[in-house]
Image (tube, coloured by chain):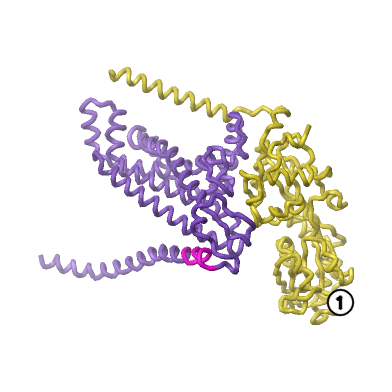
Chain colours: A purple, B yellow
């Protein structure tokens, strides 16, 4: 008993050093979120509370509800509106998940339960590779490959879309980006499902397909839902790829699949490097808006996830 | 329902989804047949524009007589697409019903360049002043005897000469404008400017005026400095009207004084008091309305372009018989 205590105390000294060090690093890392939030808020609140060098303040209510980005001349008018951007952003995220969730989850199911080992390993590597492709590359693929296809497809339906710049183009690119995320997370949680559950289901006479869909997927639903939340986060926050394929509409909201659109992030990005004054500051206000939208979406999705996780677990 | 028939049903459903899916894919990939001219008449015009921070947009909107749209998106036709230079070029290669505008230097054979008021957009037509959708880039220096010392005077003269040389013309062309000068290489012309053989790194030449010219002006400053004794340069662009004000006008002796003032419009009568020799034109910035190669329309007037961009005309049929 005694020597054991001794080793424990000697260990705990180096342990203290290490744990203090780690705590400092963790504090440093997490303090960045505070810094970001404070910086964005401090700059973004300016258009709403100052008179913007004599132009007048931006009205918060009309900023949150208006359907036109800016009424009047740039650098002179303060009649900014981002209401349609909020709707567009949520709508696009919803469509993206609607499209990428089934594909991602079924891919994960195939990799984890059905595919032979070598194929599963290859597919897993491919998915990981896809997940690490930078978003600008997805955007370029969108512009070069999807937009002409979407344009010609819309044309064959008799719809004159603006060069393919559209809601559906944006959703396609975002879905491509979020499928690997969903697959990677879902695959891990499917593999973690206790095999005895599946064995029991098979022993009761269920086919492998029935087992996979009714037992395994259900048992892994909490992890699968986490993947969907990550995908929503990615589609809410993506700027570059969206700016390339959305058409950057200045009014909205756009619900038609072949209409041009714009999200909070893509509007934030447009002309950011060249603009000054109120038109620059207002982008930080959009940043605040984006943080709030992401926070609220994630909070409500996590709430739903807890509800879903509890159901017939 | 017995399990077997249910599975068959599921299979049927699956194959149906497959069939519909592949039909859609086929439709998307099918080569689109060229549109007959008459169906194109009812085709809605897809309007593309640069965003409001763009100098090309300012030049285009002013050039077609729709200056209100220079910095205001809400006067444009509903449903327009905001895109950058490359995106507009790429879109015109795809979008049969699109219209956009780019600098003349960007135009290539993947798109159709519309004639403006009946004149084709070529460098020759820009230089002989028949092509109208363009704006001049001009500049003005301080008048003789209005310099702090002779070195600054000589350096200012050297800069004007550099601008007129082939080297200066290359810089302007690389920046996307059509240079109006280009006589002799700077390597030989520099002999006329002995000040450039000295070490000028303690002297600062100040440039100002039009902000549309800023990119070209900064490129010129950057090229001129090593070509003339490493003279320091300072570019502070605040708008065309300051080009005259801060060199020969009422701010010429203030803290914001400049040696050279640029303007992206010809100097106005009130600004022409100084001697002719203190002014010169360095370039034209020509802007071209472009569309898809299959577009049957060849020519557009300023009024027609305005009608397209403000939404008065929304179909291509308005512009050809």
List x then y, in percent, for residue A203: 21, 28
Examine the rendering and report whether any part of residue B316 can be seen. yes
Foreground: A139 or B302? Answer: B302
Q: Alpha-carbon neighbours of circle 1 within 10 Å: few (<14), some, or many (≥20)?
A: few
Range shown magenta:
A40-50
Residue extending furthest right? B276
Indicate whether A253 appears above or below B159: above
Quarter of the rendering occupied by the N terminus of chain B: top left
> Which residue sits at x=18%, y=66%?
A8
List x then y, in percent, for residue A211: 28, 31
Residue extending furthest bottom? B149
List x then y, in percent, for residue A55: 60, 65
> Which residue sits at x=46%, y=64%?
A41
Residue assigned mark 1: B144
> Which residue sits at x=49%, y=64%?
A45
Indicate whether A302 appears above or below A275: above
Chain label for disc 1 = B
Foreground: B279 or A3? Answer: B279
Quarter of the rendering occupied by the C terminus of chain B: top right
In which quadrant of the rendered view does residue B17 lie?
top left
List x then y, in percent, for residue A174: 49, 44
In which quadrant of the rendered view does residue B270 lie?
bottom right
Secondary structure mostly taken by the magenta-highlighted segment of the chain: helix
């Amino acid at each position: 008993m005694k020597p054991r205590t001794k080793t424990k105390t000697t260990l705990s000294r180096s342990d203290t050093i290490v744990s203090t060090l780690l705590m400092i690093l963790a504090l440093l890392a997490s303090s960045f979120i505070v810094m970001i939030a404070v910086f964005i808020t401090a700059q973004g609140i300016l258009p709403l509370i100052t008179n913007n060098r004599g132009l007048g303040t931006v009205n918060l209510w009309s900023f949150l509800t208006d359907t036109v980005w800016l009424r009047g001349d740039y650098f002179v008018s303060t009649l900014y509106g981002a209401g349609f951007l909020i709707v567009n952003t949520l709508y696009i995220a919803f469509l993206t998940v609607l499209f990428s969730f089934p594909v991602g989850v079924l891919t994960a199911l195939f990799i984890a339960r059905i595919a032979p080992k070598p194929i599963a390993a290859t597919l897993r590597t491919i998915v990981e590779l896809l997940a690490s492709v930078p978003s600008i590359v997805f955007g370029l693929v969108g512009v070069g490959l999807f937009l002409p296809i979407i344009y010609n497809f819309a044309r064959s339906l008799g719809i004159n879309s603006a060069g393919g710049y559209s809601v559906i183009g944006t959703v396609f690119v975002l879905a491509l980006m979020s499928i690997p995320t969903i697959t990677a997370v879902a695959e891990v949680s499917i593999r973690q499902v206790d095999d005895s559950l599946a064995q029991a289901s098979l022993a009761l006479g269920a086919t492998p397909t029935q087992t996979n869909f009714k037992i395994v997927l259900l048992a892994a639903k909490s992890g699968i839902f986490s993947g969907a939340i990550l995908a929503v986060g990615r589609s809410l926050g993506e700027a570059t790829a969206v700016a390339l394929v959305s058409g950057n509409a200045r009014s909205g909201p756009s619900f038609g699949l072949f209409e041009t659109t714009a999200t909070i992030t893509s509007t934030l990005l447009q002309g950011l490097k060249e603009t000054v004054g109120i038109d620059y500051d207002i982008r930080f206000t959009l940043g605040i808006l984006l943080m709030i939208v992401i926070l609220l979406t994630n909070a409500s999705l996590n709430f739903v996830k807890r509800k879903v996780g509890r159901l017939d677990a | 329902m017995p399990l077997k028939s249910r599975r068959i049903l599921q299979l049927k459903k699956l194959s149906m989804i497959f069939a519909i899916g592949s039909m859609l894919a086929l439709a998307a990939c099918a080569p689109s047949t060229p549109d007959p001219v008459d169906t194109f008449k009812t085709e809605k015009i897809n309007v593309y524009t640069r965003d409001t921070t763009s100098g090309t947009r300012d030049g285009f909107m002013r050039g077609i007589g729709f200056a209100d749209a220079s910095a205001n998106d809400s006067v444009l036709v509903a449903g327009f697409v905001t895109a950058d230079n490359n995106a507009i070029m790429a879109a015109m290669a795809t979008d049969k019903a699109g219209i956009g505008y780019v600098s003349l230097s960007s135009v290539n054979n993947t798109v159709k360049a519309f004639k403006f008021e009946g004149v084709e957009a070529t460098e020759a037509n820009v230089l002989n002043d028949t092509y109208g959708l363009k704006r001049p880039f001009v500049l003005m220096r301080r008048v003789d005897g209005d310099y702090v010392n002779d070195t600054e005077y000589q350096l200012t003269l050297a800069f004007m000469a550099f601008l007129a040389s082939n080297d200066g013309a290359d810089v302007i062309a690389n920046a996307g404008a059509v240079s109006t000068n280009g006589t002799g290489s700077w390597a030989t012309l520099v002999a006329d400017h002995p000040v450039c053989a000295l070490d000028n790194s303690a002297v600062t030449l100040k440039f100002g005026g039009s902000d549309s010219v800023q990119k070209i002006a900064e490129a010129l400053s950057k090229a001129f400095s090593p070509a003339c004794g490493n003279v320091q340069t300072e570019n502070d662009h605040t708008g065309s009207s300051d080009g005259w004000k801060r060199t020969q006008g009422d701010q010429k002796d203030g803290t914001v004084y400049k040696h050279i003032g640029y303007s992206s419009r010809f100097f106005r009568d009130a600004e022409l008091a100084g001697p002719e020799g203190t002014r010169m034109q360095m370039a034209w910035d020509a802007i071209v309305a472009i569309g898809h190669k299959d577009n049957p329309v060849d020519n557009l007037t300023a009024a027609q372009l305005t009608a397209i961009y403000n939404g008065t005309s929304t179909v291509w049929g308005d512009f050809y018989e």
